[in-house]
Image: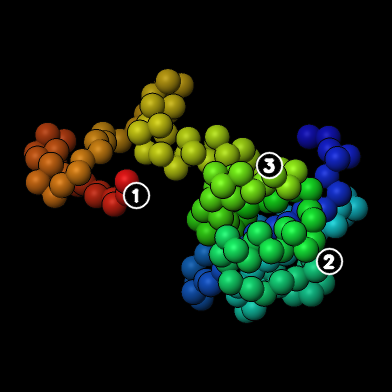
């Protein structure tokens, strides 16, 4: 993919707290993204709430902010640093959730900041279980039998239809 000359300054959202032995891939991927962006001459601003990661080493990004991963903090940082882009996909669920909230509030559009690495539409498609299932079925990818239910009783009834093993996952309504 050719370099986009419009991208001059990127805010990378880190993954926040991680437990030893878990989520190291976010720290690694974020660190490599920062290095790659810097190699391309792009200014990198990093936000992460966890000071105990490689990503927050002062040499990884041009500016490192160790602050809570909240919408308010990201908004303040965008106003202060004025990046043209935000890279939220290397911070796991924390980065995705922040990006989607900023997008839904209209904050990114209002401040002429674009998401890079993915689009909000793609994030929505991946996050919505029914939309994801539908997309996979449309392209012929196999998916596990699933159903959205709204009670424990409905979930138990569905297990009688598909059998065991079964995975139940809560979702936001």
Using the numbered discs, state the Cα–Cα distance from disc 3 to disc 2 in whole angstroms.
24 Å
Residue occupied by mark 1: 172
Foreground disc of the pair 3, 2: 3
x and y percent of residue 31 in the render? 71, 62
The part of the image, by quadrant, that contains residue 131 is: top left
Image quadrant holding the N terminus, namely top right
Question: Which quadrant of the figure has residue 59?
Answer: bottom right
Q: Is residue 165 above or below residue 82?
A: above
Vertical side of 81 occupied by 59: above or below = below
Q: Name the residue under label 3.
A: 109
Residue drawn at (56%, 47%), measured in percent from left and top? 105
The crowding category of the residue bearing disc 3, from other C-alpha atoms within 10 Å (few below 14, some 14 to 19, many at least 20), is few
3 or 2: tag closer to the N-terminus: 2
Q: Are marks 3 and 2 in contact (CB under 8 Å)?
A: no
The residue indicated by pointer 2 is 62
Label 3 vs 1, first from the N-terminus: 3
Residue depicted at 88% across the width and 39% down the height: 5
For the point 49% across and 39% down, which residue is it? Answer: 124
Q: Which of 60 and 101 is in front in this view?
A: 101
Q: On residue 36, which mark appears?
A: none
Q: Farthest residue to the bottom: give it.
A: 52
Q: For numbered disc 2, what is the local secondary structure?
A: loop
How far apart are the alpha carbons under marks 3 and 1? 25 Å
Numbered marks: total: 3
> Which label lies toward us, 3 or 1?
3
Mark 1 Cα shell of 10 Å, populated few (<14), some (14-19), many (≥20): few
Q: Is mark 1 on a helix, strand or loop?
A: loop
Q: Is residue 138 left or right of residue 156?
A: right
- Of label 2 and label 1, which has the lower sequence position? 2
Q: Quadrant of residue 104?
A: top right
Camera-side residue: 100 or 49? Answer: 100
């Amino acid at each position: 993919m050719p370099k986009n000359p419009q991208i001059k300054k990127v805010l990378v959202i880190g993954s926040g707290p991680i437990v030893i032995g878990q989520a190291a891939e976010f720290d690694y991927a974020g660190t490599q993204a920062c290095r790659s962006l810097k190699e391309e001459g792009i200014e990198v601003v990093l936000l992460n709430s966890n000071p105990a990661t490689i990503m927050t080493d002062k040499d990884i990004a041009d500016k490192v902010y160790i602050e809570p991963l909240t919408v308010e903090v990201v908004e303040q940082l965008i106003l202060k640093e004025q990046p043209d882009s935000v890279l939220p996909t290397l911070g796991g669920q924390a980065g995705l959730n922040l990006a989607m909230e900023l997008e839904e509030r209209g904050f990114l559009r209002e401040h002429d900041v674009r998401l890079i690495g993915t689009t909000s539409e793609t994030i929505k498609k991946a996050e919505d279980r029914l939309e994801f299932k539908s997309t996979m079925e449309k392209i012929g990818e196999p998916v596990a039998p699933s159903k959205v239910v709204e009670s424990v009783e409905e979930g138990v009834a569905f297990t009688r239809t598909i059998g065991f093993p079964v995975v139940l996952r809560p979702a936001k309504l």
